[in-house]
Image (cartoon, grey):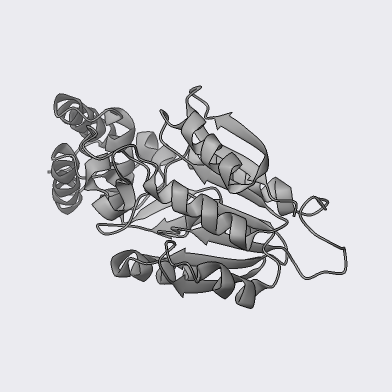
Amino acid sequence: MTARPTHLAAAAAARLAGAGVPSARVDAEILLAEALGIDRGRIPVADDASVAQQAAYEALVARRAAREPLQHILGRAYFGPLTLAVGPGVFVPRPETELLAVWAARQVGRGSDRTRPARSAPGPGIVDLCAGSGALGLYLAATVPDARVVLVERDPAALGYLVRNVAAATLAGTVTVLAADVRDPGLPGRLTELLGTVDLVVSNPPYVPEGADLDREAAADPALALFSGADGLDLIRELARRGAAAGRRGAVAVEHDDANGAGAAGLLTAAGFAGVEQHRDLTGRPRYVTGRMDA
């Protein structure tokens, strides 16, 4: 027996809310659109759902009610102009990270000469450390003309998604995937060999303090992409040193735990970066720090 899509969405939203899903109505509609093969905005005027479509929708809602991340169910996440393949084994990019991406693009985008030594130089050299799905680096490669981007990731599971996303992206620049550990002391030299001048280093690294409480969706991300020592700053300590060694005349932007704005800023300053600034997200929480290396 067929059923009205609006009735199905309302029932699913109530079920998801009862399961503790914070965005129950939105998720119910997104999953219904997926099951029906339509845009979410067409749900009110869509034809009745068939028995097969209802069964498919029920299976999707059951997974979300079990608190499987919505992006894992869909197999994709959206980040600026990008549609990224994601799933178990790779960190799901969050919307708040787009603020860092926009800041970074402004540093090296068209009309900016803040990080480029001369107008005749090649396109800006950009490094994304702990690249994961590639959200930051691919955003810059897609939006900054002639950008030369190196995406650095060590985890084999994440690298699988990263390679898929590079292959699927429409880019304004060029991208190189480098399977490497950001803690490798030889990494700055490898980056210089690939890019020559590094104009910008960006990173959304693991930054959650060990033992921190996480909601069930966040806990579905791989531990390797989440935790970074007792204070959450272990990887940022390494990034500050490697970024300073690689970006001798460039900018840096690093996301951090919302309790670690001052700590992350202090690490950049200690590594030799100038003009270090703390930035907040749209909810007012400390979200990322930036600086410049003008040696």
| Residue 137 appears anywhere in the view | no
Residue 209 location, quadrant: top left
Marker count (numbered): 0
Identify which residue is drawn at 29% across, 46% down. Answer: 227
Residue at position x 83%, y 53% in the image: 113
From the viewer's side, name the closer residue of 191 and 141: 191
Residue 153 point in image, percent of width and height: 41, 65
- Is residue 289 positioned above or below 106 on the image? above
- In the image, is residue 28 above or below residue 74? above
Where is residue 72 shown, x and y percent of the image? 27, 52
Q: Is residue 24 above or below residue 84?
A: above
Rendering quarter of residue 16 = top left
The residue shown at (30%, 37%) is 27
Q: Pinpoint residue 3: horizontal percent, then vertical percent.
A: 19, 38
Return the residue nearer the eye: 45 or 92.
92
Which quadrant holds the C terminus? bottom right
146 or 77, which lies in front?
146
Q: Quadrant of residue 215?
A: top left
Name the residue furthest bottom: 193
Image quadrant occupied by the N terminus: top left
Q: In the image as oriented, which residue stretches furthest toward the top?
A: 284
Locate residue 92 relative to residue 279 in the image: left or right. left
Position of 130 compared to 25: left or right?
right
Whether residue 20 appears in this view of the structure is: yes
Residue placed furthest toward the right: 119
**How far across and down, in percent of the image, does residue 85 sit?**
38, 60
